[in-house]
Amino acid sequence: MSTPAAAAPASASPDAPFDVIVIGSGPGGYVAAIKAGQLGLRTAIVEKDTRFGGTCLLRGCIPTKALLESAETIDRAHEAAEFGIAIEGKVSVNMEGVHRRKDKVVQQNAGGVAFLLKKNKVQTFAGHGRLAGGGKITVTPSQSGASVQTLTAKNIILATGSAPRVLPHLPVDGKRVLTSDELLELKEIPAHLLVLGAGAVGVEFASVFQSFGSKVTIVELMDRLVPVEDDEVSAEFEKVYKRRGIVVHTSTKVVGLETTADGVKATLEDAKGAQSTLAASHVLVAVGRRPVTEDCGLDKTNIALDRGFIHVNGHQQTTEPGVYAIGDIVAGKPQLAHAASNEGILAVEHIAGLNPPAIDWTQCPGGTYSNPEIGSIGLTEREAKKRGYTVKTGKFPFQAIGKAKILNNTAGFVKIVADAGCHDQILGVHIIGPRATDLIAEAGPLLKNEFTVEELARIIHAHPTLAEAVVEAAHATLGHAIHI
């Protein structure tokens, strides 16, 4: 059962100006509202969904990772005999149970957000919020017959998020041709899932359903999987996916889709223009996300747009006085939940006059929660060279880490990119392998505090841990890896 977004309390005075009104309660919006409440600002949040949390919590990060955890569990069950554990009977996936657990996790988190908003005295309004100009917002309730409210604020934060991007020649029907929204709710396991797009969304779903027993094919327009990552990470990732039995077509595009009686027929075209056809039971269209800014009242403002994305300065201010924008709707910034949360805090601190520093986006970590996982922060080797650095790199494989052997998960490595022209200062850390999305957190302070490789090499790491691969990569960068 869903938790409705709470209506404004009876004691609320919506006619009096708020210090801050946030439109959207995703990881950017609700964090901004909580921070504003903590700073003593009179704060409101407007949410059109029936629950708080936005795309990340309701249709993105959280439910996807719940599916990935179920996928990892069945993978471990198949390996149980190697660990000396006997499982009687056939190991199989119960999709009803998978969805039940996923929905429970989402429900718990959405309830937690509602509690935090209430705890921090944030007034909540259920409905579709639109800018009306002059610091005003109209809130159109979802229930028919309810009257439209008008709220006034000294500052407004737009946090309306994103939605799956679709292409005109790849029509989504929600049954056979799906976006991530529909695939998250699919009750059956596809016999053959064709994934269009090898970014984080595409490869994560590919990982889930391969573990669940689907045949999986990935088609990517670029020349490698996870193309935003370091080249060596992409190469290792593709190698592991092919070992898992996932079919990969890079430098390939889908030029047409035809729904058949029992699935979908796709027409593929490679870089040389040669065409072929591929039949699948289901297709996931994972070709990026678009900003949800088309019905926000932007026409009542002077906000500068770029293909629907909003331009902001270093403090998240738009070109409309008193209006800020954060999260997936911001032009040129990473579409990541943790990026949105930090933008929300930055915007509110600026509103409160605290003069916060702008975010250094080279120090924003990225994570791909597939099998294998990827965690990365800072510059890739290619980008560092492009920027003119004298690059020095080092790698250390998980194959040589005792804890990875204990886990029976030894694919991948840690790679460090350093500036040889500046005392080997660390420019980037790239991890592919077990728990990479957790391990990458160690690298954040290293970049923030301008650590050198030598300084990292002298930090004692506990044994046996996966984190030893990070310090071993530092030794490798210095030319004297210990355990290989």
Image: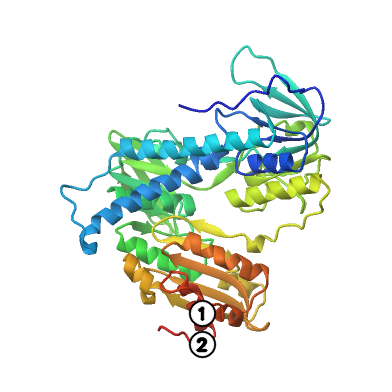
For numbered disc 1, what is the local secondary structure?
strand
Tell me which residue sits at (48%, 35%) in the image.
Answer: 107
Tell me which residue sits at (21%, 58%) in the image.
Answer: 85
Tell me which residue sits at (51%, 57%) in the image.
Answer: 367
Pick the front one: 11 or 326: 11
Assess disc 1: are there few (<14), some (14-19) or many (≥20) residues with their C-alpha within 10 Å of its C-alpha. many
Residue 104 location in percent, x, y?
A: 42, 36
Residue 374 location in percent, x, y?
A: 47, 61
Q: Tell me if residue 464 comes above or below residue 163 in the rendering.
A: below
Give the residue pinned by disc 1: 394
Q: Tell me if residue 454 comes above or below residue 373 in the rendering.
A: below
Could you tell me if residue 335 is visible in this image? no
Give the residue pinned by disc 2: 479
Assess disc 2: are there few (<14), some (14-19) or many (≥20) residues with their C-alpha within 10 Å of its C-alpha. few
Pick the front one: 303 or 189: 189
Q: Quadrant of residue 117?
A: top right
**Relative to 7, is 398 on the left or the right?**
left
Tell me which residue sits at (62%, 11%) in the image.
Answer: 145
Mark 2 and mark 1 in contact (Cβ < 8 Å)? yes
Query: Which badge, 1 or 2, comes first in the chain's sequence?
Result: 1
For numbered disc 2, what is the local secondary structure?
loop
Which amino acid does the dot numbered 2 rest on?
Gly
What label does residue 476 carry, if any? none
Which amino acid does the dot numbered 1 rest on?
Gly
Q: Quadrant of the C terminus?
A: bottom left
**Relative to 143, is 249 on the left or the right?**
left
Residue 150 location in percent, x, y?
A: 76, 22
Pick the front one: 223 or 72: 72
Q: Tell me if residue 428 comes above or below residue 193 in the rendering.
A: below
- Residue extending farthest top: 145
Q: Quadrant of residue 25?
A: top right
Q: Quadrant of the N terminus?
A: top left
